[in-house]
Amino acid sequence: MDLAVLERLNAERAARRATILVTELGSGRQRMVTPLDVAADPLADRLAEGFRTGRSALVEVGDDKVFLTVQVPSPRLVIAGAVHISQALVPMAKSAGFDVTIIDPRTAFATPERFPQVDLRAEWPDIVLPALALDPFTAVAALTHDPKIDDAVLVDALARDCFYVGALGSRRTHAARVERLVERGVTREKLARLHAPIGLDIGAVSPSEIAVSILAEVIGVLRRRPVATERTG
């Protein structure tokens, strides 16, 4: 592999940005493609599928064969709220391949005993979020019902184009939330990406059932999103 290509791939991986290495098997020529390059590439459809699924593939182009080596960051799930729903959601999300982080400054809830073997941040969002560096491969679920915690996480998640942003609460609660977020400078366009009430409408009642509805919605958005919505910066 060309050293310059290798260095670019490593830099993109370190920055949690998606790439595909295109290798022409006949000539050995290689090039790196990012989501921003897809639309203008002759393999646009196959590249878009690679970014969406995260799967590498062998592609036949006329008489030639091309191998697409897909490099997509692991999806993350950041949860605001060390609540009962989170206790059910964490093990399911981890088993589905998500790196999970919980943010909750309420130390009575955010304890290692309630959330073993998870990245638990018992601090306010404004302290935690800069280091977490939310990105388009991160999903965010706001579950506290406390605007002092949820709103800060939602503002940051929408600003950073997280692939999924959801918040717990009734439609009436959400209407009040929207007004608060607008006052904090969130645009109506960004707010349209907010899933609220959070989760698929499956008639969920218990915390475990609500967790199932949330994770199903997150995975659905992850696997169906168009590559054009991703950014690499």
Image (cartoon, rainbow, N blue to C red):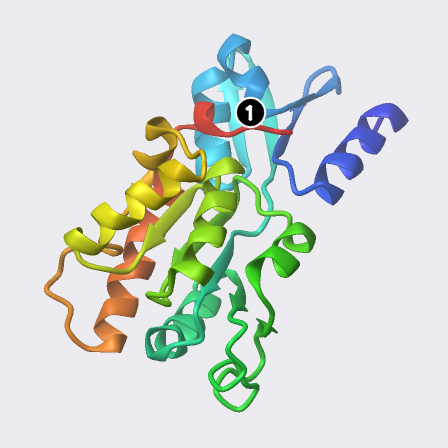
| SS category of the residue bearing label 1 | helix
Residue 62, can we see it? no
Question: Where in the figure is residue 155, as x and y percent of width and height?
Answer: 47, 44
Question: Where in the figure is residue 214, as x and y percent of width and height?
Answer: 30, 60
**What residue do we see at 33% from left, 60% from top?**
215
Amino acid type at mark 1: Pro
Residue tagged by mark 1? 35
Above or below — where is 174 with respect to 161?
A: below
Query: Which quarter of the figure has residue 200?
Result: bottom left
Mark 1: few/some/many CA within 10 Å (<14, 14-19, 20+): many
Of 52 and 231, nearer the camera is 231
Instruction: Specify whether 13 is left or right of 151.
Output: right
Above or below — where is 100 with respect to 201?
A: below
Instruction: Specify whether 70 is left or right of 78.
Output: right
Question: Where in the figure is residue 222, as x and y percent of width and height?
Answer: 40, 44
Query: Can you say which quadrant of the picture contains the N terminus?
Result: top right
Q: Residue furthest right?
A: 3
Above or below — where is 145 with respect to 199?
A: below
Query: Can you say which quadrant of the picture contains the C terminus?
Result: top right
**What residue do we see at 58% from left, 16% from top?**
37
